[in-house]
Structures are given as C-alpha cells and as structure tokens.
Image: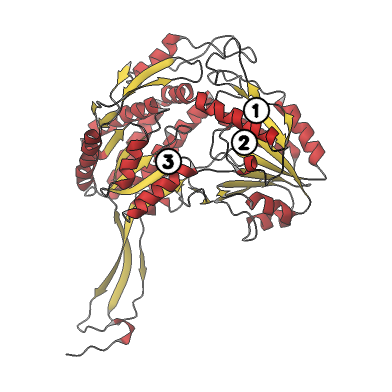
Amino acid sequence: MQDQPPVTDTAPRDPYICTKILPMDIQSVLKTLGIADTNAGVMIGKESFGSGEIIDSISPVDGKRIASFSTATDEEYDRAVAAAQSAQKEWQLIPAPKRGEIVRQFGDALRKYKNELGTLVSYEMGKSLQEGLGEVQEMIDICDFAVGQSRQLYGMTTHSERPDHRMYEQYHPLGVVGIISAFNFPVAVWSWNTALAWICGDSCVWKPSEKSALCSIACQNIWNEVADANSLPAGLSCIVNGRANVGEAMSNDPRIALVSATGSTRMGKAVAKAVAGRLGKSLLELGGNNAVIITPDADLKMVIPALVFGAVGTCGQRCTSTRRLIIHESVYDQVIQHLVSAYGQLRIGSPLDEANHVGPLCDQAAVKMYLDALQAVTDQGARFLVEGGVVDGEGFESGCYVKPAIAEASNDLAIVQHETFAPILYVMKYSTIEEAVAIQNGVVQGLSSAIMTNNVRESEYFLSCQGSDCGIANVNIGTSGAEIGGAFGGEKDTGGGRESGSDAWKAYMRRQTNTINYGITLPLAQGIKFDL
C-alpha cells in the first residue's frame, strides 16, 4: 500500500447529472488500498488465497466493474477458523491495556487512509462521500473508545453470606468471534465488533457482504500494517468472503464462540436458530422500521432537515433510516408542505459529488424491491404525495438511481409494516400522544425512534416505560446517526443485540464468579450442615 494524496473531484457540478468519475482517480484509490484487479477473498493476516467462485464488484455509481474477488471453499473456511483459534490462544495472554495499544495504532492507520477508504466505501456501496468518510470516522472513534475500555474491563466484588469468604466476578476472553456484516455499512460494523473483541482478547473471522467485499480486503490490508509492526499472530484477523453458505458455516461452527450478525430479520432468525442449536452466543442487529413523532410544539427548523436526512440519507439504506412520520393533526398540513418542498430541492446523482443529496441504491435487486414497494403502496390504497421512480439518462447508466417518495398511508398496511430498504417515507396523522406512541410501537421492529417536541411532559412520556419500545429513543434529533459510546441495537425483531458502546464489551467475554475461603473452617451456603 502506498501513500497517495486525497482524491478530489473537479468535474462540473450539475444538478441531476451524475458526476463523471475519472478511472485514474478510482485506480489511484484502489492502488493505495492494495486492491488489485483480481483479489484473493480469503485472508489470514497477510496470507491470501481463495479458490471458490469469482465475483465481480460492480459500482452502483456508474455501473462499472471495480475489481473481482475470490471466495472460500469449505476447506479454506476451516483453515481460517483454525488459524483464528490458534491466534486467540496467544493473544489472550497479552494484558488488555497492551491489546488496547494495538487498537490505538489501528485507529491511527485508519486516520492515514481515511480519504481513500471513505472514497472506496462511497464508490462500492453508493453512499455519499461525506457518509463514506463518516463511516471511516466511526471506525476511528470506536478504536479510541476501545483503547479506554481496555483499562476498564471491570468485574465486581460482592459480599459472601459465609464468614471469612470473599466473592467477586471477573471477565475472561471468549474465543473466536465471527462477524457477519451487511453491505450498507461495509466497514463500520466490522470495526464496532473487532475493536472491542480485540481488546477483550478475542480473534475475529469476518464474513462481509459480497456486495461490498473490496472494502473488507482494504480494511485487512490496513490492519496488516499494524499487525506486522507488532509481530502479531496472523489469525488474529481473518476474512472469509463468500455467499450465504459462509454465514451458515459460521453459525453452525462450535469453534465460533460468538456470532455477531448484522442484516435482515430473516437472516438473523436463521443465524439465531443455528447458533442456539449448538448453545452458542449470538449478537443480532437486524432491521428497523423507524418512526418520528411530530408534536404541535416541534421546532420545524430542526424537524425538516432531520426528517429529510433520516429518510433519504444513504438512499434509505440504513437500518436507522426514517420510514414512518407520525404528525399531529394540528400541524399535519404545515409539515407536509415543508417536507414536499424540501424533497423538491433534493439533488440526485453521483455520491462522489458533494453537491448531490441522494446517491444510488446498492444494486438492481434493490431497485426491484423499491419498485415492488411503490406498486404495493398503490395496490394497498395509499396515496403518493411525492412520486417515486427510477432516474435514467446521462450519468445514471447504472440503473440504480431512484427518486425518494412520500406516501400518505395507514400504519396497518402490509407495506408500511414491512421494512423496505429504499427511500420511501410513510406519513400519517395522530390526535393524542398516547395514540402516536401506539402507532410508533405498532410494528414488529424496534430499533430507532424519535419525538420532535418542546413539551417536557410529552418527551418524558415518550422516554418512559409507557413510551417508545425501541432500543434507541431520541428527542429533537432524527432516528439516524448513532454515536460511538452509546449501546447500539434494538428490541423485538431487531434482535436485541447491543454493539459499540456502554457495556457492549461484555458480549465478547465470558463471565466468571469466584468465591475464596480465607478462613480455617468450611461453612456451606444457605446454612447447610454436612458433618462427617
């Protein structure tokens, strides 16, 4: 990997026209990140191989092939996990603060390659360049968080009921952590898991999405620089590219102590069933059907930008994207007027052009789901306030660019209950705060939620046990944009897992209770007598 100046785009900025990307720009980024035309998709440290299926990575930005990568055979998967097992046994013997120092160095390496990696995220996945750079910043932030956490892997001391006894809890490394990540956050989710898993004394095996696999190879190349500088065991970080069969192998593999899976609810249920069948541990971060409640006291200057970004950011392909808008009847017409006006100002085009607001969906399959959802909206009796559709013409040759849509709909419609990973926003009215919360909670997903209000009573009601049933509940900010330090995840069909902050580190460790008798007698618990 070589140091290169940041890639800049000097092409003219024309609304609704996708900015042309110069091949040399992208090639420069790929070269800096160590991405070849054809890449081995299985990596044990620097060692790379893979004799399975060859897959082309196609950019949704311009429809062009970026590069290709190979996938793992069953034997190659097994080899990677075995290497991770061996590395973990060595890694766990290093004191946690020393492990934190390694993660600190990885954070610095990410700073070095932030522009290039952020550009690759944007180009391979389709999110805006600012979001791509922001995703890499999340990686840096979780590394910083993990460094501090490495000195705070606290247990607890409690009092024994027996005289001359002491009792405490401590945490030990868990083992090998399997990470299954989704295409929409191709690097951040991996780092959320690895940064914490590493400081906890675990090794990691990563199965990235085949839709954004080049990002995984780039991340491994960056990590390898740190691993080499510190003579770390190769298996500490392994990548196993492939399709669903690799995730299935992880889920059923007793050598994988924890499977952390991010993706659809359908996928998560399959993972949970397989892992539970072997009594393993799983951490699930699945779908969302996130809502924002707009009260009569809401400040519309704050509301509209939050709503628009939440609904169209990443072209609606965030698990925290705003899907439903629940508006008090007294301000409904006003909010809709402002919202429709804001949508009319959106610029659709290349995500590498910072003048644009909305980039492409990730691939043609996502476009089909979007079109099917639009048809379902009509078939189920909802009414479009802003029409959707596919954008075509010069600059949109990939066929992945779509128009954000707004539909007036009832919460009980099947299409509203379903999470469509696309920029479709459903709006509806409410009369009382109790009714609004009931609508908000009236879906099977439970990830993110928000209320826009200056009314303290309503905000506190929303945050109470009677309020939002989501893992994330916000006041006067949108549903999207998780912050490192807070535990990220949701309830119900979202899976119940927590990543990133708070005490999420505990998922990557095993807990042990210790009782020490420092006396000269052997009293039993509960006052039991057992005299010989």
Image coordinates of residue 313 in percent, x first then y, are 59, 31
Q: Are marks 1 and 2 in contact (CB under 8 Å)?
A: no
Task: Provide the residue designation for mark 2.
Answer: 310
- State whether residue 477 appears in this view: no
Q: Label 2 amino acid?
A: Gly
Q: Which sits earlier in the primary sequence, circle 2 or circle 3?
A: 3
Q: Quadrant of residue 33?
A: top left
Residue placed most toward the observer, 479 or 420 = 420
Secondary element at image label 2: helix
Q: Is residue 481 above or below residue 224?
A: below
Percent of width and height locating residue 42: 27, 30
Q: Give residue 142's mark.
A: 3
Q: Residues within 10 Å of mark 3 (few under 14, many from 20)?
A: many
Q: Secondary structure at mark 3?
A: helix
Mark 1 or 3: in front is: 1
Q: CA distance from mark 1 to mark 3?
A: 32 Å
Q: CA distance from mark 2 to mark 3?
A: 22 Å
Question: Can residue 117 be seen at all in this image of the molecule?
Answer: yes
Which residue is disc 1 drawn over? Answer: 404
Q: Nearer the viewer, mark 1 or mark 2?
A: 1
Residue drawn at x 75%, y 38% is 300
Outermost residue to the front: 379
**Mark 1 or mark 3, earlier in chain:** 3
Mark 1 is surrounded, within 10 Å at the Cα level, by few (under 14), some (14 to 19) or many (20 or more) other residues, namely many
